[in-house]
Image (tube, rainbow, N blue to C red):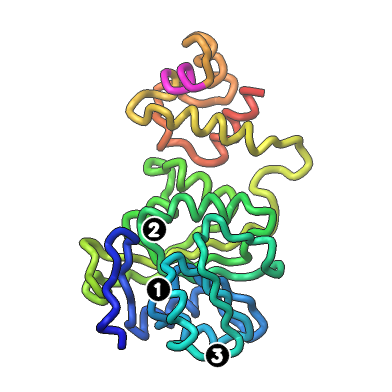
Amino acid sequence: MTHTIIPKKSLGQHWLADYTSLQAMLDASQVQPTDTILEVGPGLGSLTELLVHATDNVVAVEFDSDLARGLPARVPEDNLRVVNQDILRFDLTSLPPDYKVVANIPYYLTSKLVRVLSESPNPPLVATLLVQKEVAERLAAKPGNLSILGVTAQYYFEVSLSIVVKAELFTPPPKVDSQIVVLRRRTAPLFAAGEPFDVNAFFRVVKAGFGARRKTLLNSLSGGLHLSKPEAAELLTRAGIDPGLRAQNLSLEQWHSVYLASM
């Protein structure tokens, strides 16, 4: 049956049936029988089939109406609920607290999905995502290679990398390898819980810094925060940051210092 279903290039569909890779996703999520699992983009249901036998409650959100219609027949289990919807519009608050996300997702969705999961009033306990290897590395990047995506993910989650999944294991094969990345919700605030902290203001500063990545922080913060260059230089001096650095060089703690200096 599966050979009659043509992957839709417009939706970035690359299906994975390799048992070792799929099981690695469950293992990385530490799936327990009592967990509620949110699967994003179940496709033909190869991962879904493992999930419904590993836990009591699986919610599979599929944007493709053809695939959503066919999934209950391919995975006929009572503990599976299929929702035909865009995951970016799905109500995460309808899930119980501490649910887990397991998903093989297309590149175009990664940044938006990470932001939605991060900012939800009901974020997952763990999100295990299979994404392009380069994107996985961006999510887990260290200072020197950080991006807004990396700062966002690491502010809300502890980020770690799991196995690389070779392109040839997918149908159709993508142009690059993929990698499993694990986002584990932080149990305590990243910065001191006792101090006033405005997360929106923090990310305003971060976005200003990354607004012109090839420019120094002096120039990018000057433009992004509408400061004169002497004002931007003074802000960075107060934060203890070299104005000649670029945004990707700063750690999250250094971004916190810039945020505090800007308040």
Distance from label 3 to label 1 (Cα)? 19 Å
Distance from label 2 to label 3 (Cα)? 32 Å
- The numbered mark at residue 136 is 2
Residue type highlighted by circle 1: Asp
Q: Residue at x 39, y 58 (%)?
A: 136
**Percent from the top left, x then y, of residue 81?**
58, 79
Query: Residue 143 lies in magenta, yes or no?
Result: no
- The numbered mark at residue 77 is 3
Chief SS of the magenta region: helix
Left-right relation of 18 to 47: left
Q: Quadrant of residue 65?
A: bottom left
**Percent from the top left, x then y, of residue 149?**
46, 46
- The numbered mark at residue 36 is none
Which mark lies nearer to you, 3 or 1? 1
- Compared to residue 45, the image places residue 230 above or below, namely above
What is the count of numbered marks?
3
Q: Residue at x 48, y 22 (%)?
A: 224
**Percent from the top left, x then y, of residue 256?**
60, 35
Are the residues flagged by discs 1 and 2 in contact, CB closer than 8 Å?
A: no
Task: Say whether disc 2 or disc 3 marks the residue closer to the N-terminus.
Answer: 3
Task: Say whether disc 1 or disc 2 marks the residue closer to the N-terminus.
Answer: 1
Along the viewing direction, whichever of 244 and 88 lies nearer the viewer: 88
**Percent from the top left, x then y, of residue 192?**
71, 43
Q: Secondary structure at mark 1?
A: helix
The crowding category of the residue bearing disc 2, from other C-alpha atoms within 10 Å (few below 14, some 14 to 19, many at least 20), is: many
- Pointer 1: what residue? 66
